[in-house]
Amino acid sequence: MKKYYLGIDLGSTTSKAVIIDEQDNIIGRGITNTRSNYEVAAEIAKQSAIYNARFYLLQNRLSDIIERHPEYRRYIKEMEDAFQYLQFSNRLEWLRRQLLQTAGETAKSEASHHTMLAEVERITGEIQEEVKVDYLERDLGSKSQFFRDIVGEKYNEKVSCLSKELFEPMMLLFDKSINPVENEMISFQFKHLVEESMALLNAKYANLADVGNADESVHFDAELNLLKGNYQRVSDSLKEHINYVSEEEFHIAGMVGTGYGRALLPFPENCIKSEILCHAFGAHAVFPNTRTVLDIGGQDTKAIQVDQYGLVTSFHMNDRCAAGCGRYLGYIADELNISLNELGPLALEAQKEVTICSTCTVFAGAELRELLNVGEKREDILAGLHRAIVMRAMSLLARSGGVRNEFTFTGGVARNHAVLKYVSELVRTNYGQDLTINVHTDSIFMGALGGAMFARRNIEVALPEKKKKEELEEVG
Amino acid sequence: MQKEVIKEKSMVLQKEMLAKLFKDLSQAHETGKKVVYTFVPGNLSELIHAFDMLPVYPEINALQSGMRKKSGDFIRDAEKAGHLEDVCTYVKCDIGMMLNGNIGPTGEKLPPPDLLLLSYTGCFTFMKWFENLERYYPGVPIAMLHTPYQEGGKITKEMRDYMVEQLKQEVIPKMEMVSGKKFDESKLAGILENSARAEDLIVKIFETTKNKPSPIDAYFAGVYYIGPINTGFRGRPEAVTYYETLYEEIQERVRLGLGPITPEGEMEEERFRLVVEGPPNWTSFREFWKLFYDMGAVVVASTYTKVGGVYDYGFRHDPKRPLESLAEYCMNCYTNLNLPQRIDLLEKYITEFQADGFLVNSIKSCNSFSAGQLLMMRQLEERLGIPVGFIESDLVDPRYFSYSNIKNRLDSFFQMLGQRKIIRGQMEMEAVV
């Protein structure tokens, strides 16, 4: 039996899971937003990583065919999107029921109860339709794919057009319902969900064929074109492989949990490791010449120095204040009423950088409004904000001993291109133009990857073995 | 099962000594004893005793208030009285204690000062501290002894002469005036003889950490061991007895191969040997210590225990050169050493005591101790390739002790040490093969 290793990184904002094989290859990644029930967050991340691993295996099995017939790649990709949609849809149904139940508990009168029930049905129905289109017809791109974010945004939108009398109770209804739904573990049968996905896709392609005939200019897409009229054959030939990957048992031979919530993971104590070590180990594995790692996560920034083995020699973390971390960006996005993922691209459009003095997240909000008020442009302010947070990271790097070649940037914030721009600029200005700066598309998964790698190596962590201690005491 | 802590004889002795000191202080008014307020780094305990006066150390009272969970309220009161958030928390705690009736750690009232003896090293806040005390005790005489910093890394003849001159012209006359007694050099010499004996023993005690396992923790228990010499007992026969007893107890532990005693009993497995720079946190002292002993970490040397005097390089108070040796003592205190000297001392500790890691506890409100700590870390890392760690807390302001932040960093630090030990072990194995 093949052995797999699991790393889970329970961060303050997102929970990540990575599955690797015996050669340290990443075969599955899963990510979800961290929520009050850490166990559920970790389990969802793990399940997503396992689903992802099955799709990975499927692609691997079909690599020859995919190369010759690109429509297979397209089909599998869309199948994974449909799979995501079905999971979303399941949870949305859960939310709908919860909303209906909560409405019964919170409604002030029979009449308002009645109206609320009707609104819940309307809103969830509309969301369902919209999300289906988003997942099945559109590329979600950089948009958040977390249930809470998507459903929250859409619900808000739909409630905001209601009368004032209805708006407040409907918002309260959502606030009271989302947590229990989010913290509930919903299990799916992979095979069952994949079959449903295929049914959805086949319906889509069948419909596409008709539309395509009527107006060919609508869907001009080479891969999609190939699927037209061919999808049935593709889906039939996939069945056998899907059966195989569905039944593949993911024998997790070892696992390591890390991240700020690691102590709360339902893992044995010797499977818990510091995120400092995991991020460094993961980054070093991907870029073996790494000597300095900068990790900017949701609530902390870490500057880590590693040796040639990827072992940490020193590290520094922000203390007492989390300005400059992911949550700071989240707060700014909220202040501007845009999504977190739009911040970076907007900042990159700046014509100049407005100097931001504030080093406090909360004050930055006030400073932002003041600057908008005096006529500064949103993108110019954002450029300044991005530079300001990178300046904080630079000071942390200096404290930790500076930047040595090569430099690897990890963590969720590394996905923000404006941050990346300033990090590259400032690191090169301060530590040399010829420095190699590494950023990987999987930067957010580095901690989980490091954890999985530790699990594979089974490197004993230096935690007190309480059991052993107790035994000794009993003997003593 | 939590083990009951057995009170060693030395612990009992120390408790009795301190109880008697605070009793004497509370009765000073009746007995007519004069009271000198002074500071630990660069203290002139022997001179105070030579005039039969009693010492009060405000920073010791502050740390005691911290350990007794009273500092939060004291600091609040000092802030209400106008002292800003960033001011040294020892100062604010002391002022808060005074505003609340100046009740000392034993619950007895401390007498007001008859003399403020401003002999200090390393920290200019001490001067401001006594400027404040002078306002609370208007008219109290002040004697100031300025200790030149070892900027050049050595004590010159001019520096020594300058200090001896101050002792003769400023400090001794003020003490004569306050105590009403004439300075008796031979009496001082006798006291200094005891100092040298206690110092010899202290050096031996802190060197026992060379053993594996280390029989003591040189930081968390070390701060108790330095208690007597830092509270004015240096030069007193009780201190010699105390250190003799303590040394015997520790030697016994070495003989039995025992590890250090913690609040939860004996440490069974020594996993990590550390050298620590910076004072401990006092408000959560037990929790802070627990974070170390739970991990099997023992501190084999710390610089904080050298704030009241560095005896490692052979300095002893010298009865033959009383004033000169008092001057040298002051100039030799840890915070009076320049940064290269401190780094050299740390290097000596790390090497001689075979430490696995070097850790800095940086203090939010203490600029004098925090300055240069990053430089120390980096230089030691470069020179010795030793893993280093950095945490932040405060002396006695409970608001600045973040348990989860410190635990998170210490967890990472210990895991980093553990990981390196294993890899180093593997590499050594490979080398042998």
Image: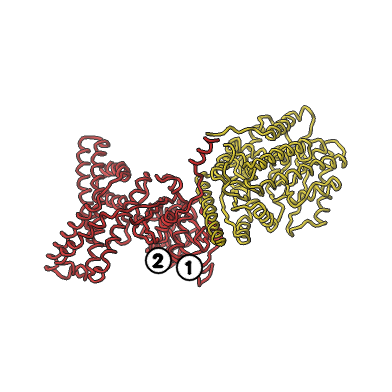
Chain colours: A red, B yellow
The amino acid type of the residue labelled 2 equals Leu
| x and y, in percent, of residue B20 in the image | 73, 30
- Give the number of the disc on residue A425: 1
Relative side of A149 to B148, left or right: left
The answer to whether residue A236 is above or below residue A266 is: below
Report x, y in % for residue A177.
29, 42
In 3D space, how far apart are the residues under numbered discs 1 and 2 (Cα atoms)?
13 Å
Q: Residues within 10 Å of mark 2 (few under 14, many from 20)?
A: some
* Quarter of the picture holding the N terminus of chain A: bottom left
Circle 1/circle 2 CB separation < 8 Å: no
In which image quadrant can residue B159 be found?
A: bottom right
Q: Residues within 10 Å of mark 1 (few under 14, many from 20)?
A: some
Circle 2 residue: A348
Mark 1 element type: helix
Image side of residue B347 versus residue B415, left or right:
right
Q: Which mark is residue B310?
A: none
Q: What residue lies at 69% left-to-right and 42% top-to-bottom? A: B132
Using the image as rendered, state which of residue B210 and residue B114 is in the foreground.
B210
